Amino acid sequence: MRKFAEELKEIRTEKELSIHKLSKEVDISAGAICHWENGKNDIKSDQLISLAKFFDVSTDYLLGLEDY
């Protein structure tokens, strides 16, 4: 899931969102997002889908399986 951690942090910072702001936008705890970005926890499928919808990208993109 290292690629996911990198992709999430990259897209979040490109959109100029803090972890706290993203947390509020997608209704996922800031702690969970921080752990994902640091590669400490794996993401659940429903949360991955929520992030993909929010950022208007595919889940495969977030997982590093395809280019944007």
Image (cartoon, grey):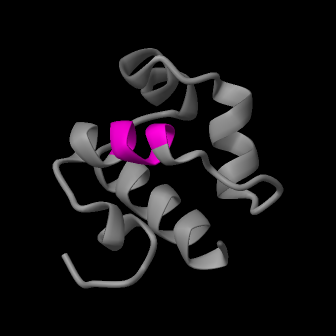
Query: Taking 67 as reference, is 50 left or right?
Result: right
Q: In what quadrant of the picture does the N terminus appear?
A: bottom right
**Which residue is drawn at the image coordinates 67% and 52% (left, top)?**
36
Give the answer, above or below, for where 47 lies relative to 27. Answer: below
Position of 29 compared to 8: left or right?
right
Residue name at image x 75 percent, y 58 percent: 38
Q: Is residue 53 above or below residue 24?
A: below
Residue 22 left/right relative to 56? right
Q: Is residue 34 above or below residue 5?
A: above
| Residue 11 in picture, x, y percent from top left | 36, 57
Residue 58 among magenta residues: no
What residue appears at the point 55 percent right and 24 percent down from the top-left corner? 28
The stretch in magenta equals: 46-51
Count every numbered label the image shows and give the total. Answer: 0
Please provide percent x and percent y for residue 15. Answer: 28, 46
The quadrant in which the C terminus is found is bottom left
Q: Is residue 49 left or right of residue 28?
A: left
Residue reaching furthest to the right: 40
Q: Main secondary structure of the magenta part?
A: helix
Q: Residue furthest front?
A: 45
Q: Quadrant of residue 14?
A: bottom left
Quarter of the image holding residue 5?
bottom right
Is 48 magenta? The answer is yes
- Using the image, determine if residue 32 lies above or below residue 35: above
Q: State the image coordinates of residue 3 (x, y, percent, origin top left).
A: 56, 78
Q: Position of residue 67 (x, y in %)?
A: 24, 84
